[in-house]
Amino acid sequence: MRPSYREPYPVTGAGVAVGAVTAFAWLLLFGLLGRDVPGYAWWTLVAGGLAWLAAAVLVRHGDRGVATGVAIVTAGGWSIAAAIVAVRWAQSGDWPLW
């Protein structure tokens, strides 16, 4: 008989959804702290960094499905923040983050 190996924490759709919703709420709450485009961008960057640290811990010691959801939504949130910064930069001609 050959041994069979199983994942201790298999990735499930429910876990990915929970991670996605949690990361969305996390980024939303931090994004609302910013009063203007630079504030929004910096708060989103900080919140995303903290979320990715949590996802890294979850990958190693917890539910990898939740970590996947967190990472996907964080990348999307950073993309939205980058697009907003790029639009403001194109409109004003001045880099908005300094």
Image (cartoon, helix red, strand yellow):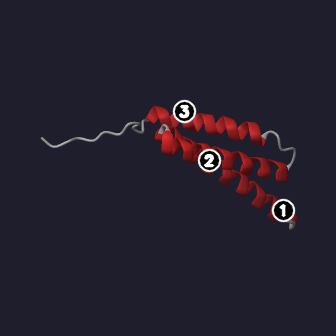
Which kind of residue does numbered mark 3 sit on? Val
Tell me the SS state at disc 1: helix
Residue lying farthest left? 1
- The residue lying at 77 percent from left, 57 percent from top is 85
Give 4 or 44, whichever is nearer the viewer.
Answer: 4
Question: Disc 2 or 1, which lies upstream in sequence?
Answer: 2
Q: How many marks?
A: 3
Which kind of residue does numbered mark 2 sit on? Leu
Name the quadrant containing residue 13: top left
Q: CA distance from mark 2 to mark 1?
A: 34 Å
Q: Which of label 3 and label 2 is nearer to you? A: 2
Q: Which residue is mark 3?
A: 18
- The residue lying at 49 percent from left, 37 percent from top is 62
Tags 3 and 1 touching, CB below 8 Å: no
Q: CA distance from mark 3 to mark 2?
A: 17 Å
| Left/right of residue 79 with respect to residue 16 in the rendered view | right
Q: Residues within 10 Å of mark 1 (few under 14, many from 20)?
A: few
- The residue lying at 75 percent from left, 54 percent from top is 84
Q: Which residue is mark 1?
A: 91
Classify the position of the N terminus by image quarter. top left
Q: CA distance from mark 3 to mark 1?
A: 37 Å
